[in-house]
Image: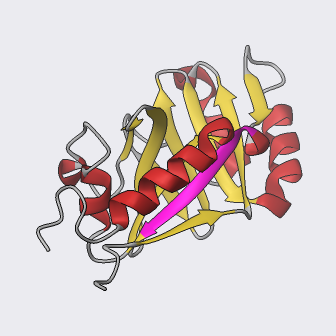
């Protein structure tokens, strides 16, 4: 039997904080509280084990170790207390997967209607994996994919199936 195109794993130890605010007005406070530079549109900034991703004109997503979520949530809420903002722990709402290996992009190409090959190394793309909304960005050795936890089993099955040799775009 041929090897899988990529290794698929669900990540359990990551926290996620959704930040909604006027980024032009509150960006500096967010960056300081998150400990990361504010990402440009369609980008993600990463430093060590934290990432801050641009999700929309007024939305960012902070991805960090689960154990640091409560402290970061408090810091962000304090920093944005004077702003019209929403800071919400969405860790339990989201599921995260890693797609690792030399052919990780091939796996995602089977599922996503976006040209992920054209995405810059610091890019973050909101798209779909088959019928599920998701966000995708580069990580060392592959990609990270987040989606709603309510469709985590569906996403895991999709990714695992797309990684199986002899399916879809795989020429072997």
Give percent across and percent down for residue 77: 83, 33
Report the magenta residues as a range: 93-99
Residue 101 in the magenta stretch? The answer is no
Which is more toward the observer, 152 or 126? 152
Among the 4 quarters of the image, the one containing residue 73? top right
Quarter residue 143 falls in:
bottom left
Position of residue 37 relative to residue 79, above or below, is below
Can you give x and y, in whole percent of width and height, for residue 156 in the image?
54, 55
Residue in the foreground of this view, choosing between 74 and 133 = 133
Q: 161 or 119: nearer the eye?
A: 161
Residue 94: within the magenta?
yes
In the image, is residue 103 above or below residue 32?
below
* Left or right: 60 as drawn, with respect to 17: left
Residue 125, visible in the rendered structure: yes
Instruction: Inspect this view and state whether residue 37 appears.
Output: no
Rendered view: 142 above or below 68: below
**Going by the picture, which residue comes out furthest to the top?**
84
Quarter the C terminus occupies: bottom left
- The secondary structure that dominates the magenta segment is strand
């Amino acid at each position: 039997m041929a090897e899988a195109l990529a290794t698929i794993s669900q990540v359990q130890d990551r926290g996620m904080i959704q930040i909604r605010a006027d980024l032009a007005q509150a960006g500096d406070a967010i960056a300081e509280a998150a400990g990361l530079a504010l990402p440009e549109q369609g980008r993600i900034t990463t430093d060590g084990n934290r990432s801050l991703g641009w999700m929309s004109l007024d939305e960012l997503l902070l991805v960090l170790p689960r154990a640091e979520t409560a402290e970061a949530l408090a810091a962000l809420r304090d920093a944005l207390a004077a702003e019209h903002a929403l800071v919400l722990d969405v860790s339990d709402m989201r599921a995260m997967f890693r797609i690792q290996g030399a052919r990780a992009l091939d796996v995602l190409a089977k599922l996503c209607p976006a040209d992920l090959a054209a995405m810059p190394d610091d890019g973050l793309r909101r798209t779909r994996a088959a019928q599920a909304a998701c966000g995708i960005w580069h990580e060392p050795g592959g990609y990270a994919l987040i989606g709603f936890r309510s469709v985590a089993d569906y996403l895991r099955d999709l990714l695992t199936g797309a990684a199986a040799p002899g399916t879809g775009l795989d020429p072997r």
